[in-house]
Image: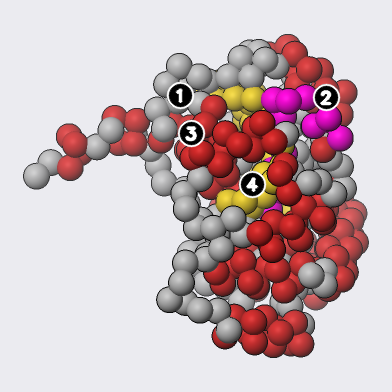
Amino acid sequence: MNINALVRPEVRDLVPYKAEEQQCPIKMDANENPYPLPKPVRERIAAALSAIPLNHYPDPSAAKLKALIAQRIGVDTGQVALGNGSDELIQMILMAFGGSDVCAVYPVPTFSMYGIIAKSMGMPVCEVPLDDKFDIVPDQFPTKGVLLLSWPNNPTGNCFSQERMEELIAKFEGIVVVDEAYYDFSRKTFLPKLAEMENLIILRTLSKIGLAGLRVGMLVANPSVVREIEKVRLPYNINSYSQVAASEVLSDPGVIDAQINLIVEERENLYYRLRGLRSGITTYPSDANFVLIRVKDAAKVHQGLITDEGILVRNLSRPGPLENCLRITVGMQDDNHGFLVAISRLTRML
Ligand SMILES: Cc1ncc(COP(=O)(O)O)c(C=O)c1O
């Protein structure tokens, strides 16, 4: 049987999203929160999980979790839809508002799943290059389609300038998605714009703030948009364990909020110390929980960090704007220090 001949052509040509599978003692590659939950919180979660009746389906609307999330964001529950990670919400948005004659419009480089999901659904894509400061150039964007803007942008780390964002989204006639996956570290948001823009969707996630294993993404939009999204949501997409564990953490969020503050402090530290190294490293400003750097030989530095120090970072190097770029997720204080010592040594040897 020739499976290749059976698969949809747009899927045949796709390359799967490549999550890092290499095991390393110090993980600074996946934009996760490096701090574990404290033992008392884990014990509270374990007790709550053990009471779940696994013979029953989860709460189909994840009502308790949704209420906690709406409260945290400061919106009504009717403005919220939940996904199995914000990846699933991106897929749901394109299912509801995309199509073979609707373009997925996004700047490049950006989060690779925008293109992967759009292409897998047979949508044409319009990729608009960022300028040399990794900012958007509004004039170069079309005005129709589904616009996807990662703000802060993964993997460059910056928020595109506010004025350019406003100019671009004001003239865009289709659905505008502002993906605020890193909002907790940038503390900048387009949420207030929902009052005047019915076509705006904001995405957030619990993945970056300590609950990546639960796969909970959040969509915030006007109720008219949320109703359409709900039509394409698969039943029970948020499993019982995730609903209960996330609700436990969010009902007393002081712990994760303190961790977020630590990460922001450490990001600033990491950024300024990298800038001070003077060993041929270009360090880009970041509003997220990671920092993008450019070195002379990314492959060598990436491998050196693994073999010498057991530190895994993300190697993004390929010809083009990310040539020789590495993305460093902010780690715990000691790990950041170890990373700085190691990169200083490795880049001086190049
Ligand atoms: C910009 C952006 N959006 C969405 C996601 C996906 O997040 P989730 O874990 O909620 O699917 C990521 C993860 O890296 C991201 O960087």
Counting residues from the start of the chain, the first of labels 2 and 4 encountered is 4
Instruction: Tell whether circle 1 marks a residue whose Cβ is less than 8 angstroms from ligand 1.
Output: no
Label 2 vs label 1, nearer the camera: 2
Q: Which residue is mark 4?
A: 81
Residue 201 belongs to the span the image colors magenta: yes
Counting residues from the start of the chain, the first of labels 4 and 3 encountered is 4
Q: Residue at x 72, y 74 (%)?
A: 248
Residue 117's x, y, as percent? 48, 38
| Residue type at the position of mark 2 | Glu
Q: Secondary structure at mark 3?
A: helix
Q: CB under 8 Å between callouts 2 and 4? A: no
| Residue type at the position of mark 1 | Gly
Residue 275's x, y, as percent? 86, 50
Q: Which residue is mark 3?
A: 95
User: Which residue is more in the foreground, 25 or 228?
Assistant: 228
The residue segment tinted magenta is 192-205
Q: Residue at x 69, y 62 (%)?
A: 65
Above or below — where is 186 with respect to 340?
above
91 vs 282, left or right, is left
Is residue 84 something that shows in the picture?
yes
| Residue type at the position of mark 4 | Ala
